Image: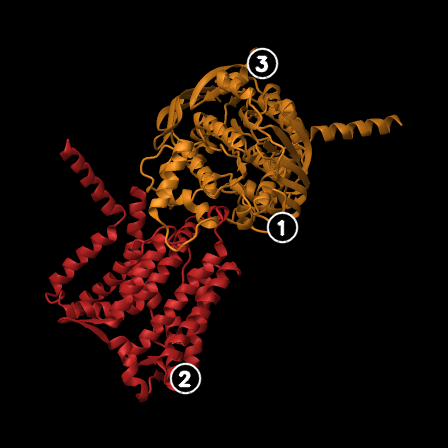
């Protein structure tokens, strides 16, 4: 009797694993592959390095999960990071104050996010078009302001500002880099927001069916504004972190292809591209998976120019898999 | 053309929509297909017209077995289906819609507009309706759109025309003209299947009838051998339940819950009425009568002007849904799939949504609280579910509707607007919903039921407001709620009679 129940629960557990938590499955399969290719993959230095690399895009991917769950898309995040980090460095060099720079970055992110949100909610523009336009504007402005040259952190601030990305918390024999803590911290916070707060439920409701959500009393426009603003703020934070990591922001190439990486991370993480369904833990693993794949490809000597092709392929495969799963349901 | 359907079964997942039905139409026959909503009529016709294949069963045309894998194949065999919902593309012109996917081409492959416009005009002339084939469908009235749908089927030679409630938006005059054309085609050997709820029409134009109930064919015969009463009994099949509702108690109290004065909005004007605690008012009207807009406007989903008072407190009619919710109004919307359920969300979250928006305070949602609220509503509404963590789409239509109702009860709604509440719900659950509505009135809730179905209005309403072209055309008391009265006032027949009287008196003078 009990064995029957166990069998059934095992079966339903496996089914659930394949249909709903496939990102765990792919994550562990990828991990095995990574260890097979690179025997030193599981070393702490490598793991923490992957987290540091993931942090800038991973943090934005958390916001993108909200946007896509609400049935929208934002392709301006890469250009946002470029203009925020570039101008952030200008502010830092003028004020010599990291906090003021941080507030500036967040403020600029808020403004760009608000613009995106208003264009979509009040202007009734398709998000794809609205953010394509803001992307173009942001990138063009920072190119003009940079006049081809990079925005470089001045020598005075070099030592102190470097610590944002390069600093760490010592824990016994391990060093936990700040970006890793930031990424994990934000992920926990956003996981809680999406699963346990009014905002989270409203985002899923709006992404699932706008009309039904509105008739259940959800302020649809407000939610649309909020998801873009939150993502703008995360771009602000990420731009600040990015500036510290590179110390010299090249206007034309900063944050290039971030939108693809970010959307790919969300897609591998199982968030439905049609909205309504998605989980932060999926995006968290998805963002890591993206970097692990890069890591494997680097080990296999694949040229970095092919990164764009890889992220494109990842998006296609991830979304096709989602569709197949939805059909089999 | 002789059409025979044998042993047709159609299932959608666990739901058996059509259950072993044999159905025959002879050449030159007009067959009425009757049954309550959800009885399986439309599904059966969709099978016949090739919209989807049957799960089981066979179709024979003139004795030859056929299998349609899409509706184009059925059309090629001479079977036309005029669907209940108007399915025209608003951005295309009338003639473009009529020839959609069957365009007439010039030898060089371009569209032969001239020919198409000419043929469209011919059909309109035959129907004696005044519609310009080059008009954008966007600019048409609902009745005109319905006429275009019908005209589309008459454009090409066909042997069997299926009409699924073609007359809902039409005036009596349009219907008379339609019947003339039907009789003429019938004499040429064309057969019809006519789906309608309107008894007088059925008796007038149809030769034979088939009655469906719960997916099964329950009776067949000639209209000349039966009367309206007998047909209605065949359709409903539950004489007992019917009687139980005919002695419906009235729980109306003196306290006014909702007072509406001169409310106007898109599609309706000068609506005034009072709704008391414990009272159930039905508001009815044909498509395009402003019924849908009025429901939305009362709930604040679309803007309106006029005066609204809720429990003696003035409400800004321009205020939105959230203000209405906070003052105690709730709406169980029509078209549950598109407007009610949040299909990606769990049963828990669907139930919790209105409470979350009006009453919830605090930062984190407690799963325990969600569970308790669900348990409470599950008991009081007898909701049948497997695991409430599953998406709401795992439930049957009736149980989904109960979740939506429970959603509002958890938000402590005092005034509940039910907009077409039993759409796509099986007969058994329908009756449950009627009992729930009456029970809510007993508990002192004030209720408006927006409905187009007489049986539904009759079962729950204490009084009935009939809309015609956006105005209140009649206020019927409980005793006056009859199928005839509702049809009479919702088609504006009384106004037409008045007009005729005036004309007559003019002639006399």
Q: How is the image coloured?
A: by chain
Pointer 3 local density, CA inside 10 Å: few below 14, some 14–19, many at least 20? few
Taking B288 as reference, is B439 left or right? Answer: left
Taking A34 as reference, is B396 left or right? Answer: right
Rounded to the nearest whole Å, what is the CA distance between mark 2 and mark 3?
88 Å
Query: In this rendering, do the residues under marks 3 and 1 share a single chain?
Result: yes
Q: Secondary structure at mark 1?
A: loop
Q: Secondary structure at mark 3?
A: loop
**Is residue A176 or residue A88 the one in the foreground?**
A176
Q: What residue would you read off at disc 3?
A: B227
Relative image position of residue B102 (x, y in whole percent): 51, 40
Of all chains in the rendering, the one displayed in red is A
* N-term mark: 3 or 1: 3
Relative vertical location of residue B453 with respect to residue B258 in this rendering, above or below: above
Kindly identify the residue that appears in the image at 53 percent across and 39 percent down.
Answer: B414
Residue B410 lies in what quarter of the image?
top left
Tell me, yes or no, whether the two marked residues, 2 and 3, touch with CB atoms within 8 Å: no
Q: What residue would you read off at disc 1?
A: B316
> Which subunit holds the residue at mark 1?
B
Taking B414 as reference, is A288 left or right? Answer: left
């Amino acid at each position: 009797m009990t064995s029957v129940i166990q069998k059934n629960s095992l079966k339903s557990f496996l089914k659930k694993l394949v249909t709903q938590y496939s990102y765990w499955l792919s994550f562990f399969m990828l991990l095995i592959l990574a260890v097979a290719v690179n025997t030193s993959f599981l070393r702490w230095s490598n793991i923490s390095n992957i987290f540091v690399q993931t942090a800038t895009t991973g943090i934005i991917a958390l916001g993108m999960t909200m946007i896509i769950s609400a049935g929208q898309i934002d392709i301006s995040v890469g250009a946002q990071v470029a203009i925020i980090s570039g101008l952030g460095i200008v502010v830092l060099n003028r004020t010599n104050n990291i906090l003021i720079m941080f507030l500036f970055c967040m403020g600029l992110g808020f403004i760009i996010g608000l613009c995106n949100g208003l264009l979509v909610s009040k202007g009734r523009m398709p998000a794809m078009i609205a953010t394509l336009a803001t992307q173009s504007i942001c990138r063009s402005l920072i190119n003009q302001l940079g006049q081809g040259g990079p925005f470089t952190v001045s020598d005075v601030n070099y030592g102190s500002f470097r610590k944002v990305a390069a600093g760490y918390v010592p824990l016994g024999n391990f060093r936990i880099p700040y970006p890793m803590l930031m990424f994990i911290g934000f992920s926990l916070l956003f996981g809680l927001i999406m699963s346990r707060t009014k905002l989270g439920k409203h985002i899923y409701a709006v992404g699932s069916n706008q009309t039904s959500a509105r008739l259940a009393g959800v302020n649809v426009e407000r939610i649309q504004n909020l998801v873009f603003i939150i993502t703008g703020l995360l771009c602000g934070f990420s731009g600040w972190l990015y500036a510290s990591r590179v110390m010299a922001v090249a206007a034309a190439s900063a944050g290039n292809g971030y939108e693809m990486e970010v959307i790919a991370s969300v897609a591998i993480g199982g968030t439905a591209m049609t909205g309504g369904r998605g989980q932060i833990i999926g995006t968290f693993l998805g963002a890591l998976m993206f970097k692990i794949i890069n890591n494997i490809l680097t080990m296999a000597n694949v040229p970095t120019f092919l990164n764009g092709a890889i992220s494109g392929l990842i998006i296609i495969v991830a979304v096709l898999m989602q569709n197949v799963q939805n059909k089999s349901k | 053309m002789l059409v025979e359907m044998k042993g047709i079964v159609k299932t959608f997942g666990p739901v058996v929509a059509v259950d072993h039905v044999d159905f025959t139409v002879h050449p030159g026959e007009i067959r009425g297909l009757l049954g309550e909503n959800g009885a399986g009529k439309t599904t059966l016709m969709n099978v016949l017209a090739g919209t989807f294949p049957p799960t089981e069963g066979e179709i024979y045309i003139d004795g030859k077995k056929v299998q349609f894998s899409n509706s184009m194949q059925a059309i090629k065999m001479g079977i036309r289906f005029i669907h209940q919902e108007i399915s025209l593309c608003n951005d295309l012109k009338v003639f473009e819609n009529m020839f959609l996917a069957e365009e007439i081409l010039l030898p060089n492959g371009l569209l032969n507009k001239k020919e198409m416009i000419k043929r469209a005009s011919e059909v309109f002339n035959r129907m004696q309706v005044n519609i310009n084939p080059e008009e954008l469908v966007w600019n048409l009235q609902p009745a005109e759109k319905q006429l275009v749908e019908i005209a589309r089927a008459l454009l090409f030679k066909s042997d069997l025309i299926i009409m699924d409630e073609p007359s809902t938006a039409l005036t009596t005059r349009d219907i008379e003209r339609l019947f003339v054309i039907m009789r003429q085609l019938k004499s040429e050997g064309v057969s019809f299947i006519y789906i309608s709820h309107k008894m007088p029409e059925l008796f007038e134009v149809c030769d034979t009838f088939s009655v469906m109930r719960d997916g099964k064919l329950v009776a067949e015969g000639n209209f000349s051998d039966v009367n309206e009463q007998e047909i209605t009994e065949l359709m409903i099949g539950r004489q007992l339940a019917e009687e139980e509702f005919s002695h419906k108690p009235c729980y109306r109290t003196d306290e006014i819950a909702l007072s509406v004065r001169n409310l106007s909005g898109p599609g309706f004007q000068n609506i005034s009425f009072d709704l008391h605690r414990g009272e159930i008012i039905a508001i009815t009207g044909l498509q395009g009568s402003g019924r849908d807009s009025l429901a939305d406007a009362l709930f604040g989903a679309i803007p309106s002007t006029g005066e609204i008072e809720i429990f003696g407190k003035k409400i800004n009619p321009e205020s939105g849904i959230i203000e209405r919710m906070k003052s105690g109004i709730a709406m169980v919307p029509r078209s549950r799939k598109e407007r009610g359920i949040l299909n990606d969300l769990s049963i828990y979250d669907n139930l919790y949504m209105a409470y979350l928006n009006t009453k919830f305070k605090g930062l984190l949602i407690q799963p325990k609280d969600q569970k308790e609220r669900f348990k409470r509503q599950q008991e009081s509404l007898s909701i049948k579910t497997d695991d409430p963590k599953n998406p709401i789409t795992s439930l049957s239509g009736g149980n989904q509707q109960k979740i939506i109702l429970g959603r509002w009860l958890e938000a402590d709604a005092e005034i509940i607007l039910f907009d077409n509440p039993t759409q796509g719900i099986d007969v058994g659950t329908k009756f449950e919903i009627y009992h729930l509505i009456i029970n809510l009135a007993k508990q002192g809730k004030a209720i408006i039921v927006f409905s187009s179905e007489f049986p539904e209005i009759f079962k729950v309403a204490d009084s009935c407001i009939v809309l015609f072209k956006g105005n209140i055309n009649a206020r019927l008391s409980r005793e006056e709620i009859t199928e005839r009265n509702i049809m009479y006032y919702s088609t504006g027949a009384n106004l037409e009679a008045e007009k005729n009287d005036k004309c007559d008196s003019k002639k006399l003078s």
